[in-house]
Image: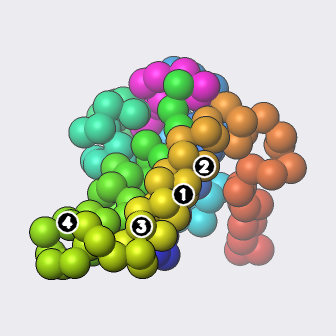
Amino acid sequence: MRLTRAGEYAVRCMVYLAYKGHGVLVSKQEIAERTEIPSYFLAKIVQQLSKARLIVITQGPKGGYSLLKPAAEVSLLQIVEVMIGEISLNECVDRPSSCSVSKNCSVHKVWEKASSQLRETLAAVSLAQLSENESCIPIFPVRVSNA
């Protein structure tokens, strides 16, 4: 399993919002610039995050995005699974009926255990933890034009 670009960008966006603070309204432009997410892609990502009730979208010239829940209540797993669906390493884990031998297959049990461990690891990490160390926040410097 490899995290999609949408998943990566969603994590960047959410960590940045957590860094700014729960309920703090942050403009689309600021997030796009500081996290190097293309603006058009960010617009798509936030729709999914909003639908999942992780953020609030405020429309208008002074609009932007803010965390709906405190950062400590949002896990890395929640963000990733909003973007890519439930994590599973193999189709037989996600849909055991897709393989006639999955009930007795020793490899299936390994895939199942690995999927479970990955989900547990991601669930154990909150946005608060990811944003507490400023030097670890995936924030990119704002580019200043020489014009």
Q: Which residue is mark 1?
A: 118
Is the image coloured rainbow, by chain, by secondary structure, or in one colour?
A: rainbow
Identify which residue, 51 or 109, lies in the foreground.
109
For the residue carrying disc 3, how many other residues have a C-alpha within 10 Å: few (<14), some (14-19), or many (20+)?
A: some
| Residue 117, horizontal then vertical, whole percent | 55, 54
Q: Are marks 3 and 2 in contact (CB under 8 Å)?
A: no
Seen in the picture, residue 51 relative to 94 is either above or below; the reply is above
Question: At x 71% / y 56%, what residue is drawn?
Answer: 138
SS at mark 4 in the image = loop
Quick one: SS at disc 3? Answer: helix
Q: Is the residue 75 above or below the residue 108 in the image?
A: above
Residue 71 belongs to magenta span: yes
Q: What's the magenta region? A: 64-72
Q: N-terminal of the two: label 3 or label 2?
A: 3
C-alpha separation, residue under disc 4 versus residue under disc 1: 18 Å
Q: How many numbered marks have been drawn onto this rendered protein structure? A: 4
Give percent across and percent down for residue 31: 55, 50
User: Between tags 3 and 2, which lies in front?
Assistant: 3
Residue placed most toward the observer, 60 or 4: 4
Instruction: Residue type at mark 2: give it.
Output: Thr
Q: Which residue is the site of mark 4?
A: 95
Q: Is residue 113 left or right of residue 84?
A: right
Q: Which residue is mark 3?
A: 109
Residue 42 visible in the current orientation:
no
Q: Which residue is mark 2?
A: 121
- Mark 2 neighbour density, 10 Å: few (under 14) some (14–19) many (20 or more): few
| Callout 3 touching callout 4 (CB < 8 Å) | no
Residue 80: horizontal and vertical position, in percent? 44, 54
Sequence-wise first label, 2 or 4 = 4
